[in-house]
Amino acid sequence: MEDCLFCKIIKKEIESQIVFENESVIAFKDINPQAPVHILIVPKEHFTSFLDVSYADTQLVIDIFQAAKKIAQKEGIAEKGFRFAVNVGDEGGQIIKHLHFHLLGGRQLSGSLG
Ligand code: 5GP
Ligand code: ZN
């Protein structure tokens, strides 16, 4: 989608530190990390938010979860634990309107999500 920052990152028009990529998913380091490991896992297809995902996208959802698992293992945070989170809409704290999942780890994360 034009004028979408993450679509531009996917097309490599904007630089990012890519840690994983396959046909359907790309993952890159967050530019403003909130933890020692902070990676964004992003479907290559443009979905504005989580609310746009339907049963037709079942394989994509599996791909995203598999990517998260692989990256967590590769980054060495799988054993100790991590957070896998998605922000939805304005009150959910979603700033970039292209669906993405945050993979956070490498420090003790607070129990509160607020
Ligand atoms: P949201 O608040 O939409 O769930 O998260 C958007 C995330 O994208 C933020 O954590 C922010 O730091 C990250 N971000 C924003 N712009 C860029 C960018 O140009 N490159 C990268 N790698 N991350 C970005
Ligand atoms: Zn997009």
Image (cartoon, rainbow, N blue to C red):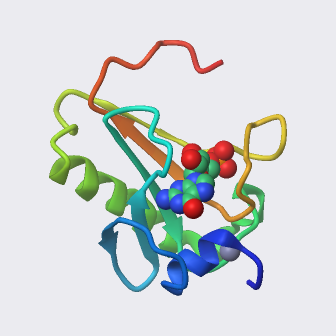
Q: Quadrant of residue 67?
A: bottom left
Residue at the image point whose x is 40% and y is 37% from the top:
104
Based on the displayed image, in which of its 4 quarters is residue 78 positioned? top left
Q: Position of residue 12 (x, y in %)?
A: 48, 84
Q: Residue visible at 15% across and 42% down?
A: 76
Report the side of 14 relative to 98 (left or right).
left
Residue 106 or residue 62, whichever sits in front = 106
Q: The C terminus lies in which quarter of the figure?
A: top right
In the image, farthest residue toward the right: 90
The number of discs equals 0
Judged from this view, the residue extending furthest toward the top is: 111
Q: Quadrant of residue 100?
A: bottom right
Above-or-below relation of 67 to 112: below
State which quarter of the image contains the N terminus. bottom right
Q: Nearer the viewer, residue 90 or 29?
A: 29
> Percent from the top left, x then y, of residue 95?
74, 49
Q: Classify residue 76 as left or right of residue 33.
A: left
Is 56 on the left-hand or right-hand side of 61? right
What residue is at 16 percent from the left and 53 percent from the top? 74
Relative to residue 95, is residue 70 depicted above or below? below
Residue 23 image position (x, y, % from top left) = 40, 86
96 is higher (above) or lower (below) than 6: above
Which residue is nearer to you in this view: 19 or 41? 19
Q: Nearer the viewer, residue 16 or 1?
A: 16
Q: Is residue 53 left or right of residue 41?
A: right
